[in-house]
């Protein structure tokens, strides 16, 4: 059973969001990394770029498949996890910690309310199985 | 209902993630595909390949039949146990399947074909067999098959056999097998490593599996099997070649036995294709830019476009690699279209990896 931390918000496409001081940290869920298997390549948005909720902003590639990642929220990308370039397996090993992908300065904090809470996300991945 | 191999429960017990593979419930990995890949390159791993199709061909006409059916020549098998890799072609020279055929003993061959092609292969073989008297084909669906692969595979697997069997196994040369009662062991595989493929009755498969794991052999899934065979430059049927491709354009010209007058299915077409000139070449690609090469991506060369047939990530080289069909004469650096970007890749000789070692140094300097 995958880990779904209760303090996070989610997209049904498996991205997670943690908001602290108007900054959203974004990654992909434990369930997503399990589905993909060993990750070998991650493409992140550029720092300084402005992204809109729902945009395809990057790609995660495992040995077996490539998967687009979508922006859960709108705003400017203020930081990316550069350690992922040399070690994409950090996402497999610690999807909610060292495996974070990028941070966004929120344009509209209320957007976060539209995301799934942990229970709703856990339910959506159970339906998938 | 998906087919299950006799090892289905063993896979669940080992924590496998199961996927559908050509109608079979098979393990894709047991946690980490890369760790399993590395286990095979550095130590020993075991794959359940019981979904493969085993057909025994026997009778006075067995050799004549297989010499008609297959593009490689089973007359080359002169010693009991010897194995031969071959394509089975249609009259147009397209590949119906690729397979391994073993000479078990006089007038008795064992053919191992793919699982995804089982129904059409068996129908094709039966149809061709009608013209032969004194011939029996027997689909061995009660056999399980375990592939034990890696530099330590033979030693660890041998310990599970009786003393007299261990001696016979120690003397096996590559591409050769030996029969013990209801068990057949061959020094063959699909990983580019040494090892055995072990065929046993379905009822004893779980016991063999458990004893191999107890001997320190890592359970490995189809995910690792695919990256291992890709590194080893071994074709995958349905991906690198199919009924619309000739062995000439799939890197399989070396498997065609065209000498003499042997009249096998597809021969006329192969000779015509060769006389007309082979327009495509089958090569390895090493990605120089960042990213991952995937099946069916377009390859741009100065001589025209080609296509990746199999692409993935190479855990051994820690780069992305692929096999591709390109216009004949393509060489050097080419470009691959990945998500609307053109990435640089270098044409290299196959295989990429053999027995745990990168073959790239020679390959890339030569080309």
Image (cartoon, helix red, strand yellow):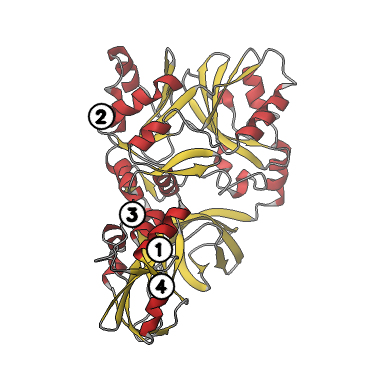
Disc sitting over residue A2 in the figure? 3
Between the C-alphas of marks 2 and 3, the distance is 29 Å
Q: Indicate the chain on which mark 2 is placed.
A: B
| Between discs 4 and 1, the one toward the N terminus | 4
User: Disc 4 marks which residue?
Assistant: A115
Q: Which mark is residue B214?
A: 2
* Circles 2 and 3 on the same subunit: no
**CB contact under 8 Å: marks 2 and 3:** no
User: Do tag 3 and tag 1 residues touch (Cβ < 8 Å)?
Assistant: no
Q: Position of residue B196 (x, y in %)?
A: 38, 29
Read off the chain for label 4.
A
- On the same chain, marks 4 and 3? The answer is yes
Helix, strand or loop status at disc 4: loop
Residue closer to the observer: B264 or B112? B112
Q: Residue B243, percent across and down? A: 66, 44
Labels 4 & 2 near each other (Cβ < 8 A): no
Q: Which comes sooner in the sequence, label 4 or label 3?
A: 3
Left or right of residue A12, residue B33 in this image: left
Locate residue B202, reporting x and y percent. 45, 22
Residue, disc 1: A120
Q: Nearer the viewer, mark 4 or mark 3?
A: 4
| SS of the residue under disc 1 | helix
Q: Is residue B356 visible?
A: no
Q: Report how far apart the C-alphas of labels 4 and 2 lie in the structure.
A: 47 Å
Residue beneath the point at 43% across and 20% down = B203
Is residue A6 something one can see in this rendering? yes
């Amino acid at each position: 059973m995958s880990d779904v931390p209760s303090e996070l918000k989610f997209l049904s496409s498996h991205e997670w969001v943690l908001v602290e001081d108007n900054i959203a940290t974004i990654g992909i869920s434990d369930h997503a990394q399990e589905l993909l298997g060993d990750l070998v390549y991650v493409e992140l948005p550029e720092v300084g770029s402005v992204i809109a909720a729902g945009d395809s902003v990057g790609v995660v590639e495992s040995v077996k498949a490539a998967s687009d990642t979508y922006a859960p929220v709108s705003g400017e990308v203020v930081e990316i996890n550069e350690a992922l370039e040399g070690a994409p397996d950090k996402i497999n090993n610690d999807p909610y910690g060292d495996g974070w992908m990028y941070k966004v300065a929120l344009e509209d904090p209320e957007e976060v309310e539209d995301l799934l809470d942990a229970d709703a996300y856990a339910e959506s991945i159970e339906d998938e199985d | 209902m998906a087919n299950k191999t006799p090892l289905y429960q063993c896979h669940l017990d080992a924590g496998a993630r199961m996927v559908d593979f050509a109608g079979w419930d098979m393990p894709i990995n047991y946690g980490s595909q890369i760790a399993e890949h590395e286990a095979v390159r550095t130590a020993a791993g075991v794959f359940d390949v019981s979904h493969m199709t085993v057909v025994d061909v026997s009778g006075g006409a067995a050799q004549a039949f297989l010499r008609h059916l297959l593009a490689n020549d089973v007359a080359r098998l002169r010693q009991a146990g010897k194995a031969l890799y071959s394509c089975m072609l249609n009259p147009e020279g397209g590949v119906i399947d690729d397979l391994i055929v073993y000479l078990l003993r006089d007038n008795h061959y064992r053919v191992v074909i793919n699982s995804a092609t089982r129904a059409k292969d068996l129908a094709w073989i039966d149809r061709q067999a009608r013209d032969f008297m004194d011939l029996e084909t027997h689909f061995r669906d009660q056999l399980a098959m375990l592939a034990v692969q890696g530099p330590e595979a033979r030693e660890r697997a041998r310990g599970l056999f009786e003393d007299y069997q261990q001696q016979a196994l120690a003397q096996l040369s590559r591409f050769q097998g030996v029969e013990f009662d209801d068990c057949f062991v061959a020094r063959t595989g699909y990983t580019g490593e040494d090892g055995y493929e072990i065929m046993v009755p379905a009822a004893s498969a779980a016991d063999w599996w458990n004893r191999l794991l107890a001997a320190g052999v890592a359970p490995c899934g189809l995910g690792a099997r695919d990256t291992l065979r890709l590194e080893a430059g071994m074709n995958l049927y349905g991906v690198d070649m199919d009924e619309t491709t000739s062995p000439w354009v799939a890197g399989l010209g070396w498997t065609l036995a065209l000498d003499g007058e042997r009249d096998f299915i597809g021969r006329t077409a192969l000779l015509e294709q060769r006389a007309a000139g082979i327009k495509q070449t089958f090569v390895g690609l090493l990605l120089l830019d960042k990213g991952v090469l995937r099946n069916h991506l377009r390859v741009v060369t100065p001589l025209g476009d080609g296509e990746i047939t199999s692409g993935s990530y190479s855990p051994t080289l820690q780069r992305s690699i692929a096999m591709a069909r390109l216009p004949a004469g393509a060489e050097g650096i080419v470009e691959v279209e990945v998500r609307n970007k053109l990435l640089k890749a270098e044409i290299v000789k196959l295989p990429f990896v053999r027995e745990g070692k990168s073959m790239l140094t020679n390959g890339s300097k030569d080309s």
